[in-house]
Amino acid sequence: MPELQGGVWRARLRSKKVYDVQATDLVASLVSPAPQGRTGKRGGAAAGRGNKKTAEGRGRKALKASGKDFRVADLHTNLPCQDLPEAREAVTGRAQKDLGLNKVADRAADLIMDGESGDKFAAAEDETTTTPVPERVQVGNSPEYITDRKLGKGGFGQVYVGRRVSGGGSHTGPDAQEVALKLEHRSSKGCNYGPPYEWQVYNYLNGCYGIPSVHYKGRQGEYYILVMDMLGPSLWDVWNSVGQAMSAHMVACIAVEAISILEKLHSKGFVHGDIKPENFLLGQPGSVDEKKLFLIDLGLASKWKETSSGQHVEYDQRPDVFRGTIRYASVHAHLGRTGSRRDDLESLAYTLIFLIRGRLPWQGYQGDNKSFLVCKKKMGTSQELLCCFCPAPFKHFLEMVTNMRFDEEPNYSKLISLFDGLIEGPASRPIRIDGALKVGQKRGRMLVNLEEDEQPKKKVRLGSPATQWISVYNARRPMKQRCSDPTRVTRNLVIRLVVD
C-alpha cells in the first residue's frame, strides 16, 4: 500500500508538472516576446530575481504572484504593434451586434425591476424591430395629423401626440386640434397581423363612462392606428409631482370615482385586467375635464360573462399564464385563475394603498421567479400590516374585495360608502366624483355598519401559499357558489379542520 500511494503521488506530480508546462507555453504563445528570466517554484517569470531587477531597471514596477502555481505574463507596452484593419472591423462588428441583441434583454430587465407586466417585453422587442412610425397619419375619414412627440408606450402599442394639419379648435372630440394616436405594429402580439383585440373592446365600450372616446381607427402602412381624445397626466405622474405621497382626501376621491368607472365597465360585461396608477389619467389641463378621471389601456380586458346567455364565464386555472402588472395584480391573477370583477377591485385596493404609502411590501424582488415571490408575499401580508399607515376605510375596502367569490357581484354602492367620511366639500375636491354621486342618487346609499354579522370574521387559508389560496369563512351565512370554482370547500369539513 505505501508503494501504491507513493506511485499515485508521483504520477499526480508528473501530470501537474506537465500541465504547468502546457499552461506556460500557452501564455507564452499568446504574449510575444516573452521576458527572459528564472522561474521560481512559487511564482511566475516576473517573480524571479532576474526578472525583478530587469523590470526595475526599465522603470516599471515588478509584478508579484499571489498564489501557488500561477504564472504572470509580463506585457511589454513599449514594443511596436501592427494594426490589422480586418481584425478591428471584425471585433467592432461583433461588439455592435452583441450590443443590438442585448438592447431587448436590457429593456426587459428594466421593466421587471419597475414592476411592469409580463406582456411589456413584447413592446420592448417591437421597439427595436418595427418600422418607423409614419410622420403623417390619416385613417378612415379622419383629418390629417402630424405625428408629434411620444407620450408613452405599453404592452400593446405606442402613443403619440397628433397635431391636426388644418382646421379644428376644440380640446376634445373629432375636431380637436390635438389628439392621441395609438399605434400598434401589425406583427405585434396584440395584432397578430390583424386588427387589435382592443378595437373590439372599444366598439363595445365607446361612450362608456370614464373611458376615452375613439373617433377614428384604421390601418396605415404597417400600423393599426386609433385616434382618441387627448388626456392629461396619469395618477403616477401626479403622485410623483406631489412628493410620492398623496393625501387621504385625494386618494378617497380617486377611490370612489375609480369604483364608479369599474362599475360601468363591468356592467358592459368586461373586466379591465390591468388596474394601476399609470392607467388612470386626468383630463387635459385647461379643459372642462381637467379634474375628471379616465381609465385607459384595454389591451388586457376580457369578458366576465357570456354575451349570448349573460351567464358568468366558467372558472379555469392555468398557473403558467399571467396577465397584468406584477406589483398590482390580484393573488388570483398570480395563480393563473380566470379574471373576474373581484380581480379589478383587488388591484384597485393595492393601487390606492400605494398612492398613500408610496410603496408596497412586495416591491424590490428581482429574477425569473419574481412573480412567485411577490405572490407569496401578498398572501403572507395581513390587511393590518398592509394598511397600517392608511385610514380605516382602505383596510375595510381591502378586506371586502379580497373576500369575494369568483362569480360574486360586487356591492359597488357599499364600497363607495366606505370613503364618505374622508371626502370633503365639492370646492376642495381634487378629483371630480360625478360617477360616485350618480351611484348614490340612484341607489340611495347609506352609511354601512361594518360590524354587521354578515361580514366575514376570519379568513382561513389552507395549503401551501405556493400552490393554492383557498378562502373559506368560518363565521358567515351559507352562500351560493358555482360548482366550477375549485376553491369551494364543504363548510362542515372546514370547521372540522379548524377545530382539529
Image (spheres, rainbow, N blue to C red):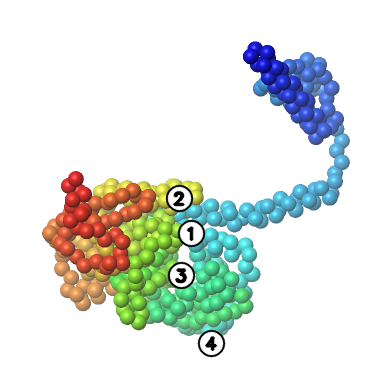
Disc 4 marks which amino acid?
A: Asn
Q: Check the image and report above or below for 172 versus 53.
A: below
Q: In the rendered image, which residue does mark 2 sit on?
A: 370
| Residue 312 in view, yes or no | yes
- Where residue 132 sits in the image (x, y, percent)? 63, 69
Position of residue 394 relative to residue 273, above or below, is above
Q: Sequence-wise, which precedes: disc 2 or disc 3?
A: 3
Amino acid under disc 2: Lys
Q: Label 1 near label 3: C-beta < 8 Å?
A: no
Q: Which mark is drawn over residue 299?
A: 3
Amino acid type assigned to the residue bearing label 1 in the image: Gly
Image quarter of residue 41: top right
Q: Residues within 10 Å of mark 3 (few under 14, many from 20)?
A: many
Could you tell whether 402 is left or right of 24 in the image? left
For mark 4, give the secondary structure: loop
Which amino acid, by three-letter code, is at mark 3? Gly
Q: Residue at x 85, y 38 (%)?
A: 81
Q: Nearer the viewer, mark 2 or mark 4?
A: 2
Relative to the observer, which residue lies in front, 197 or 137? 197
296 left or right of 440? Answer: right
Element class at badge 1: loop
Marks 3 and 1 sit apart, C-alpha to C-alpha, by 13 Å
In primary-sequence order, the first of circles 3 and 1 is: 1
- The CA distance from mark 2 to mark 3 is 23 Å
